[in-house]
């Protein structure tokens, strides 16, 4: 932590800060510059958390020099993590494809989808049983009934299954049926839910919040890991910007940034990022080329009648074609698929 | 709802859409333009929620013409709502000031603050007992112990009290101690929490999400009202933009926009919007002049040692000075304070 | 300037940077922290502009500690500037109102507007003769003919006049007719134009770019002042965000931020910020309460037929009513109007 | 164009609008919905440009149904354009790589770079002679001297050369030396400059503005094409968002969106998009996989001493390695490189 003083800061102001730092058992390293004086704090800065040095007299600003996330930080865990989900591994040299409908609507829909995506090569079935919807009047999900269909699909096909959870009650239900929990974008800073997901024992897919910085996202993952659950996979799904041509703006740079800052695997969801079916293929290719460890892609037996997000869902034929085109690309990047 | 067809759409494509609309018992009004054909849907468009017309052949786009929120909508409830909280009213011709610390830290801190802000004229005491913090290593709140201090402050001073809730467990605890629940920005689209707050019976202060549009915010309020709880107050607290001079960007236009679209009262939180103490006064004045029904302002007996958000908290003296300057301004706008 | 090294940076890497800094005649102050080493640069950092220390081995990041703008910086010019335009002063204890049509359309329109706004109390007439329009097929302005009408209005009413300039040719024409040049949002980083405006000798109103940070805005003003022209007034007119309820998002916090960082006056343009007529009054009030030195408000004899921005223009009656309501508010803030 | 009326709009209000539309020789198609009435305008809506229907009584909003750009619009020009620059073609089945320093610093630097990038396979040399810099105190470019070095490099190597222009004077100089003009992000809506570039006769690379929507970008290209110059290539270079891990946010979705809306080629500049050297390779791969027609990548003989944007520049070795990895990827997407 660095404290930058205002120009012409009084010696007493500098001395005051030095005393506060030293009173906490920390070192204060003072640099007198031509224009301003800078004070470096040496030692564990968390000891200063009850001292708001920003508002001490003559302080201009505080500059943090270390990240607040530790367990997710590559600096302290240089080897990339590989997360086991069912019989599948996320991270390392495999490319994982999660696919399925936005919302679970019926047993038939889920089973048909599971068989279709498995045939095309997907390893994980997704499907929403608890749907966070902007309007209270939109379809809200089948809840536990939906989870049962997901489990049945898993038992029939051997695919691992993942479902979004939106409350403690949903987690308690989901652990009985699924292999991986998903925390959605709108709940990325629902810290209570993060802690409960951490305690669940299941691996967690953590989607990036619509307006979350990469730093906040890694801090959110820290909530899960700090509960003793290191099995976190990140999912970039688009951030909110001024552009309206796509529903969100896929921040493709997040892939190499995460690879540099964290050991956690990262996958990309081009369906939610764009909201438009015809952009899913180019952005899937793009994500793999940027180094993503996998993709989450929405499919539906009949997108025209889907109860949620139909316009961005692929038909089974479109999904199969996409998988066929992904194969040589994955190979080029040394990924098995 | 309007369906805009692509140029040169085939007559069969147009006919197909007409049939789908009519099969749902709705009317389809076709306008053949010079460049494109437009189809207006007449009737209750929610009947079309399982038909994704966007992906029908030759469809260019779908344009909604009515808002999805109804109960919060001024069109169907033209009179402004006035919400009772303890013995105070929010909305109408009163200016309500909520004040207190970001986080409840101790009994002494809460009681001292309650007495100080009451003397200056505030009507409601705020204080966080459950703190959503970016990092799991930051102070997370005193929980139920904090709620007890708040109730004690209410009993001593007669001020109404408000606390943020972040889970069902927190709501269950809070209803025993406080007069109003707060849903924070990070939980604005935690729909599960919104429903539970709706069921609590207490009035709810709903903060705007960091990247929520005004439309999404009103839809979030709809979740609460749809549970039979019409006592919702909105709080603008800054949105996330590229500007870094302030922590967030206060969207002051939200005040007149909400006044035009909804009957719900709206207050402004300049402390969280800016994150900087010296901007709190000008933005408080600004909010009242824009027509806000109230303010939420952080105060602390000793901001330099506050465990959360100290840099944006006012001292009691600064708060008193602000209240004194607000009084003639409120009078100019016909607001009692 | 502070150089933050990576954890476990090699001593040679630190030594290398120290040598580069000292070779430029600067001082290097090294702080060995528990986790990282920090190097403070002492002296004029511009000497390092051909050394990209970011990419030296083991460097984590570079943190600037001083602003790059000097002439616009309050630190080096603590007294607020007051700018003379015609017979009017902007800054200090006066509230200046600039008003008029978005685009100059005819002699009659300009003269009628000038007389109307003068009667209501405005001091400066605005009117666009060179219009930057998103589409090349929209009305582009009357150019020099428009400037002549503006001058005629000035001669008839005694109002000062301001016009936007978009090229060197436009500046060369405008200096013959107007009292103040306006640089529009889309040209805020047209550095060539800024320099030419600086050389013109006329005071300049510099609008904030749609996605410009306050820092970039002050740096843009520095381009004008560095040409020997200190007469710059800033104009906040909304920034681009995800919110679509208003055309742009008025960043009201920019007013106190500018007042803290710079000595230049700042006015607010609620017409362009919102794009909606009924929000102009509340945001005008809001801007004055936040401490703005003035307002720029669009008026038109008949907004329904305006060739540009009609939906946000006030009628003369609406403008007169606004001025009447602004008067007691200005008085409350010690501003003459 | 569709006019959406407010609920309970008076019949006279609807009639008034119908009359205005018909008075312009256009058709008005009225749909009476259950909640609102909608009026479709049939014919050339530009005839309504002096009628601001938004502010007519009882009007709720206006919804445009056709794009304002015509010449850049794929609807009216379905075949993809291929643009000739020197002896190179941009678009179609070739992948074009433009490379070189951010700023031209010396004859030696430019010639060394030209030879190095040609050897690696690049077809076009870039180099800035007129530099738009945030601060007036940063290096502003060698101007015409820089252009001469670029021409010399062209003559020696046969590479085509491109330079950014920032004023009419710069265009007048550049046409004597270069094969293609570049309009930078900060000038994307400098409409005066766009028109002059259109008149120059040279092909133009149009970078996207930092906060420009795709629609505004295509409208900007329309300014150039409308001057009789159809040779426009678009360049996505990142947009401004709240994320600070990268300098800008590369909007990779812009590639498929442009491919769907326009016939113009689009290339991607990962150097400016990220500002960080180590992200250039993954984002280059990503752009090609998304369907981009080319890349613009900064290289420098010695990035550590570059006068502009050194931290994002590749060394010649890094560039050569990147080109080698791009080759099989381009082949996979049917692109020659």
Image (cartoon, coloured by chain):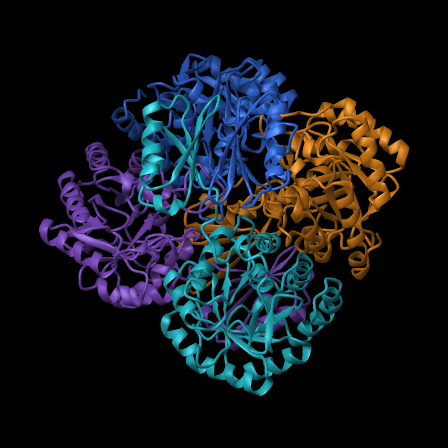
Chain colours: A purple, B cyan, C orange, D blue
| B204 displayed left or right of C276 | left
Residue found at x 34% / y 62%? A222
User: Residue A172: where, in percent of width, then height?
Assistant: 24, 67
User: Residue C167: where, in percent of width, then height?
Assistant: 69, 26
Residue B182 higher or lower than B105, as above or below: above
Is there any visible trace of residue B166 in the rendered image? Answer: no
| B221 displayed left or right of C198 | left
| A45 displayed left or right of A286 | right
User: Residue C271: where, in percent of width, then height?
Assistant: 67, 43
| Residue projecting furthest to the front | D11
Residue B134 higher or lower than C200, as above or below: below
Residue found at x 86% / y 28%? C152
| C36 displayed left or right of D15 | left
In depth, the one of D66 and A119 nearer the eye is D66
In depth, the one of A336 and B262 nearer the eye is B262
User: Residue A199: where, in percent of width, then height?
Assistant: 26, 68
């Amino acid at each position: 932590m660095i404290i930058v003083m205002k120009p012409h800061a009084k010696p007493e102001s500098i001395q005051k800060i030095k005393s506060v730092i030293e009173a906490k058992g920390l070192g204060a390293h003072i640099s007198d510059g031509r224009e301003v004086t800078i004070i470096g704090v040496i030692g564990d800065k968390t000891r200063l958390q009850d001292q708001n040095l920003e508002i001490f007299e003559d302080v201009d600003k505080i500059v943090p020099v270390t990240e607040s996330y530790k367990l997710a930080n590559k600096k302290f865990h240089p080897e990339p993590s590989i997360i086991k989900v069912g019989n599948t591994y996320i991270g390392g040299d495999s490319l994982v494809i999660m696919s399925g409908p936005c919302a679970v609507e019926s047993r038939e829909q889920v089973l048909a989808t599971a068989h279709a995506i498995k045939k095309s090569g997907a390893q994980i079935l997704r499907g929403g049983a608890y749907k966070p919807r902007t309007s209270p009047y939109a379809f809200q999900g089948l809840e536990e009934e939906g989870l049962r269909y997901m489990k049945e699909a898993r038992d029939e096909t051997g695919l691992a299954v993942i479902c979004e959870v939106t409350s403690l009650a949903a987690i308690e239900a989901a652990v009985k049926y699924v292999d991986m929990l998903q925390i959605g974008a709108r709940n990325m800073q629902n810290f209570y839910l993060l802690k409960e997901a951490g305690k669940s024992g299941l691996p967690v897919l953590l989607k990036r919040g619509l307006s979350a910085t990469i730093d906040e996202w890694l801090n959110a993952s820290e909530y899960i890991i700090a509960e003793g659950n290191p099995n976190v996979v990140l999912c970039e799904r688009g951030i909110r910007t001024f552009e309206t041509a796509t529903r969100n703006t896929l921040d493709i740079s997040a892939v190499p940034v995460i690879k540099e800052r964290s050991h956690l695997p990262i996958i990309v969801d081009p369906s939610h990022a764009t909201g438009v079916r015809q952009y899913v293929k180019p952005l899937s290719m793009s994500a793999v080329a940027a180094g993503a460890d996998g993709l989450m892609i929405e499919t539906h037996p009949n997108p025209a009648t889907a109860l949620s997000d139909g316009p961005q869902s692929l038909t089974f034929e479109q999904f199969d074609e996409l998988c066929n085109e992904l194969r040589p690309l994955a190979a080029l990047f040394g990924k098995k698929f």
